[in-house]
């Protein structure tokens, strides 16, 4: 494994800036975010299935771009960790909110949050930081 990839993997797995789903749930609440899920996109959003992901985004072009990015990142993690034979039992949902405001409002997560892996789903928003946030959240799906 290359040094930069190894460092990124250690950082991703270290939990730096992460919050567990248990911490997201309301204290004393009856369901966890991973059980209930967060609200999806508004009516009219696009959905695109790829080899590993079911992408939900506002517009077919944004769904296509997010699908290509998620598959490229997934392939990179698989190659760098030699998990070539790993295949999920079903597609991972990726919900891509249009704005940070929509993401925070619909997930109810803290202001510092930019993305979350909840259960088998990924929730984040469009923006310049999408690539590293998606890569980080994806490691939670792959490595549990």
Image: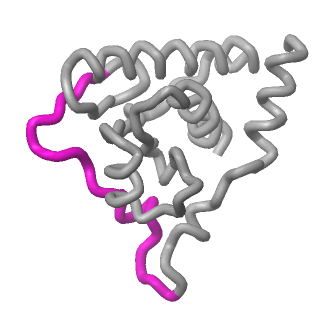
Q: Which residues are magenta?
A: 28-49
> Residue 63 versus residue 141: which sits nearer the camera?
63
As for residue 46 lying within the magenta part, the answer is yes
As for residue 130 lying within the magenta part, the answer is no
Residue 67 point in image, percent of width and height = 38, 19
Q: Quadrant of residue 143?
A: top right
Residue 114 point in image, percent of width and height = 53, 46
> Which quadrant: the N terminus?
top right
Residue 7 point in image, percent of width and height = 86, 26
Residue at the left extreme, as displayed = 44
Q: Is residue 78 above or below residue 90?
A: above
> Which quadrant: the C terminus?
top right
Name the residue at 55% across, 30% down. 129
Residue 75 point in image, percent of width and height = 58, 14
Q: Quadrant of residue 141?
A: top right
122 relative position to 56: left or right:
right
Residue at the right extreme, as displayed = 3
Name the residue at 51% across, 45% down. 115
Residue at the bottom extreme, as displayed = 28
> Residue 120 versus residue 10: which sits nearer the camera?
10
8 relative position to 110: left or right:
right
- Most frequent secondary structure within the magenta stretch: loop
Q: Quadrant of residue 45?
A: top left
> Residue 21 versus residue 62: which sits nearer the camera?
62
Name the residue at 47% across, 22% down. 70
């Amino acid at each position: 494994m290359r040094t930069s990839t190894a460092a990124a993997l250690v950082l991703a797995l270290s939990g730096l800036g992460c919050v567990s789903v248990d911490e997201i749930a309301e204290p004393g609440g009856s369901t966890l975010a991973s059980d209930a899920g967060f609200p999806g996109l508004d009516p009219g959003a696009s959905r695109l299935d790829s080899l590993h992901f079911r992408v939900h985004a506002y517009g077919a072009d944004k769904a296509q771009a997010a699908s290509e990015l998620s598959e490229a990142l997934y392939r990179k993690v698989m190659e760098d960790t030699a998990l070539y034979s790993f295949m999920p039992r079903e597609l991972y949902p990726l919900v891509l909110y249009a704005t940070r405001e929509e993401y925070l409002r619909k997930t109810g997560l803290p202001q510092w949050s930019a993305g979350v892996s909840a259960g088998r789903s990924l929730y984040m928003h469009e923006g310049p930081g999408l690539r590293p946030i998606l890569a980080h959240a994806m490691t939670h799906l792959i490595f549990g």
